């Protein structure tokens, strides 16, 4: 990617194509009302039956079955459980539409009648909504194929939550098997008012570094702490000191997030264990800030262990990592304008960069050339509840975010907005009606 966050290439056809309006969306979207109820049923079914990363067998089979019924050529098992659905429809651009499929190890607490039936697993990030919206868009685009020319590649991706699925699909010969797209498009449901779409040009989603930290002490009886090197105290001191990285080592004009999401140690109240484990999550936007934060984490972890008198140096290992997601500026302008023409320009906003992370960018950056990427958010929260929470200053408390056990997007108008946005975006990049034979 170029320094300004755009794709950094100078392909003439992309530059000239940035002003194209693409195929008109009106006739394609006319079929949405007829399929909304069926899509809502599908969404509830997927929500009730979540599957963890690389275990999305049922979800993948359902996506494959439905896409094939719309007339797509479907390939299953790409990168494990990934599904690719291709519709050839004359000469023109290749447009990649992507949805992720995996759920999270979260126990659902929404109380919904279609809540998860799988203990300890939940669609707490909305990937069930993403799959449903992509299937809806694929159906509408197939039904309206007389109105556009080109090639659609629908991608149902596994294992986004562990930052592996997109790269594994690429490594499974994605470009050689399905072609190099001219644009990569996708979306993510978010906790802002349903009916709105948000997209930001340039660095739009943060990079993530997830680390496992093992601290080694010396176990002893709880009555004799003097005989121990207590890893619990060591871990507690480390957690507190890590909080100073952002507040004291990162400039106020920069952005970084350091979160300790897990601290595990010991088995019993009167036993001082000999080991503690932390799981640390880091979010940054620039290589310079990322390097500074990672170096600070290593320094603090080792320093606290040394201060505690640890006889063995801590171990720091990577769990997973997401790259920064950079939206191509021209692709954002073109896509946002098209969506705004349909849902209203006042309903398309720029949310600024978000500190969440995404691996969809691998589909745009892993080919021999950089591919324009446009990835946007669409709202899933009750607009009245959001407005009330904002008036009361309780938005963060009252509106469940992604990964919360209470996260539950409204079925409508969330579904309709997601299907409309994805369909409209695809048509903005496809050519107009095919010439008569």
Image (cartoon, rainbow, N blue to C red):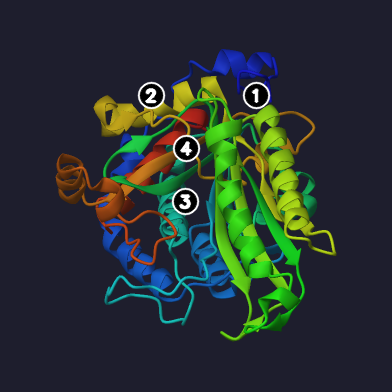
Task: Judge depth for marks 4 and 2 and give the one in front.
Answer: 4
Task: Judge depth for marks 3 and 2 and give the one in front.
Answer: 2
> Considering only order in the chain, which callout, 2 or 3, is on the residue closer to the N terminus?
3
**Closer to the camera in the image, 348 or 207:** 207
Residue 7's disc is 1
Can I make out residue 278 in this image? no
Residue beneath label 4, please?
354
- Residue 301 at x, y percent in the picture: 71, 52
Within the image, what quadrant is residue 367 found in? top right
> Considering only order in the chain, which callout, 4 or 3, is on the residue closer to the N terminus?
3
Residue 337's disc is 2
Is residue 2 shown left or right of residue 28? right
Q: Quadrant of the C terminus?
A: top right
**Residue 405, placed above or below residue 269:** above
**Residue 49, placed above or below residue 188:** below
Q: Quadrant of the N terminus?
A: top right
**Closer to the camera in the image, 172 or 375:** 375
> Considering only order in the chain, which callout, 2 or 1, is on the residue closer to the N terminus?
1
Is residue 80 shown left or right of residue 350? right
């Amino acid at each position: 990617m170029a320094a300004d966050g755009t794709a950094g290439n100078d392909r003439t056809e992309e530059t000239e194509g940035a002003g194209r309006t693409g195929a008109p969306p009106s006739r394609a979207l006319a079929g949405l009302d007829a399929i909304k109820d069926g899509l809502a049923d599908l969404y509830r079914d997927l929500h009730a039956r979540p599957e963890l990363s690389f275990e999305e067998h049922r979800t993948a089979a359902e996506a494959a079955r439905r896409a094939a019924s719309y007339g797509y050529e479907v390939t299953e098992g790409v990168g494990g459980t990934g599904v690719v659905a291709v519709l050839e429809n004359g000469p023109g651009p290749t447009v990649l539409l992507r949805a992720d499929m995996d759920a999270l190890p979260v126990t659902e607490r929404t109380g919904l009648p279609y809540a998860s039936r799988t203990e300890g697993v939940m669609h707490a990030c909305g990937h069930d909504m993403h799959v449903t919206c992509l299937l809806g868009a694929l159906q509408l685009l197939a039904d309206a194929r007389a109105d556009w020319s080109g090639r659609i590649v629908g991608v149902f991706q596994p294992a986004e939550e562990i930052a592996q699925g997109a790269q594994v699909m690429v490594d499974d010969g994605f470009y050689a098997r399905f072609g190099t797209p001219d644009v990569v498009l996708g979306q993510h449901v978010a906790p802002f008012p349903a009916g709105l779409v948000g997209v930001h040009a340039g660095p739009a989603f943060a990079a993530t570094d997830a680390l496992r930290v093992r601290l080694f002490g010396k176990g002893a009886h709880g009555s004799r702490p003097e005989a121990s090197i207590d890893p619990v105290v060591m871990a507690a001191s480390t957690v507190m000191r890590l909080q100073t990285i952002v507040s004291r080592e990162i400039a106020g004009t920069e952005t970084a997030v350091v979160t300790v999401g897990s601290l595990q140690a010991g088995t019993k109240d009167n036993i001082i264990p000999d080991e503690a484990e932390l799981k640390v999550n880091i979010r940054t936007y620039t290589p310079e800030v990322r390097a500074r934060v990672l170096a600070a984490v290593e320094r603090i972890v080792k320093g606290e262990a040394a201060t505690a008198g640890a006889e063995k140096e801590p171990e720091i290992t990577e769990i997973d990592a997401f790259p920064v997601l950079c939206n191509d500026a021209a692709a954002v302008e073109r896509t946002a304008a098209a969506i705004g023409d349909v849902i209203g320009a006042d309903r398309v906003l720029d949310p600024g960069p978000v500190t969440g992370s995404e691996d969809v960018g691998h589909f745009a950056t892993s080919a021999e050339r950089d591919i324009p990427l446009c990835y946007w958010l669409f709202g899933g929260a009750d607009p009245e509840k959001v407005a009330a929470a904002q008036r009361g200053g309780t938005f963060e408390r009252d509106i469940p975010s992604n990964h919360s056990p209470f996260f539950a997007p409204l079925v409508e108008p969330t579904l309709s907005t997601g299907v409309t946005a994805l369909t409209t975006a695809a048509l903005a990049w496809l050519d107009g009606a095919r010439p008569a034979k």
